[in-house]
């Protein structure tokens, strides 16, 4: 695991401790909330490992297993690759790819 991926995972875990047991954004259980944070962290870590995708330009949010990607991509290939990575991540039920191509 590279340093960027380890940093993302650590920040995800630290995020868990800062929110405590609060369930927000309409999750029905604390377990779903934790699962969503785990999925988001995994997707971001995979972006960090992939040379095609700029993890700094693409935002990842997860709600009840649905991953929403937003931000900007330099090419259609980068946008497509980000969606493929998210779909291949364990726990992901669906992906909403709202990434916009940068003009």
Image (cartoon, grey):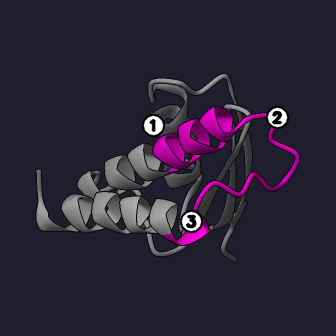
Mark 1 or 2: in front is 2
3D distance between C-alphas at marks 1 and 2: 26 Å
Q: Quadrant of residue 101?
A: bottom right
Q: On residue 28, which mark appears?
A: 2
Identify the residue at horizontal 58%, vertical 62% (top origin): 20
Q: How many marks?
A: 3
Q: Residue furthest front?
A: 21
46 in the magenta segment: no
Q: Residues within 10 Å of mark 1 (few under 14, many from 20)?
A: some
Vertically, is 27 above or below 75? above
Q: Residues within 10 Å of mark 2 (few under 14, many from 20)?
A: few
**In screen coordinates, is 35 left or right of 96?**
left
- Per the rendered image, the range of residues in magenta is 18-40
Mark 3 or mark 2: whose residue is earlier in sequence: 2
3D distance between C-alphas at marks 3 and 1: 12 Å
Q: Residue furthest right?
A: 26
28 in the magenta segment: yes
Q: On residue 58, which mark appears?
A: 3
Front residue of 18/11: it is 18
Vertically, is 78 above or below 33? below
| Residue 15: percent from left, percent from top | 49, 67
| Residue 78: percent from left, percent from top | 49, 53
| Residue 51: percent from left, percent from top | 27, 57
Determine which residue is flagged by label 1: 85
Q: On residue 57, which mark appears?
A: none
Q: Quadrant of residue 83?
A: top right
């Amino acid at each position: 695991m590279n340093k960027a991926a380890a940093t993302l995972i650590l920040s995800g875990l630290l995020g868990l401790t800062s929110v405590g047991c609060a369930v927000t954004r309409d999750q029905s259980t604390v377990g779903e909330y934790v699962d969503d944070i785990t999925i988001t962290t995994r997707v971001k870590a995979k972006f960090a490992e992939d040379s095609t995708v700029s993890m700094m330009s693409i935002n990842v949010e997860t709600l009840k297993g649905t991953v929403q990607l937003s931000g900007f991509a330099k090419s259609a290939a980068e946008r497509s690759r980000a969606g493929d990575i998210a779909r291949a991540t364990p726990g992901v039920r669906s992906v909403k790819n709202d990434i916009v191509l940068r003009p």
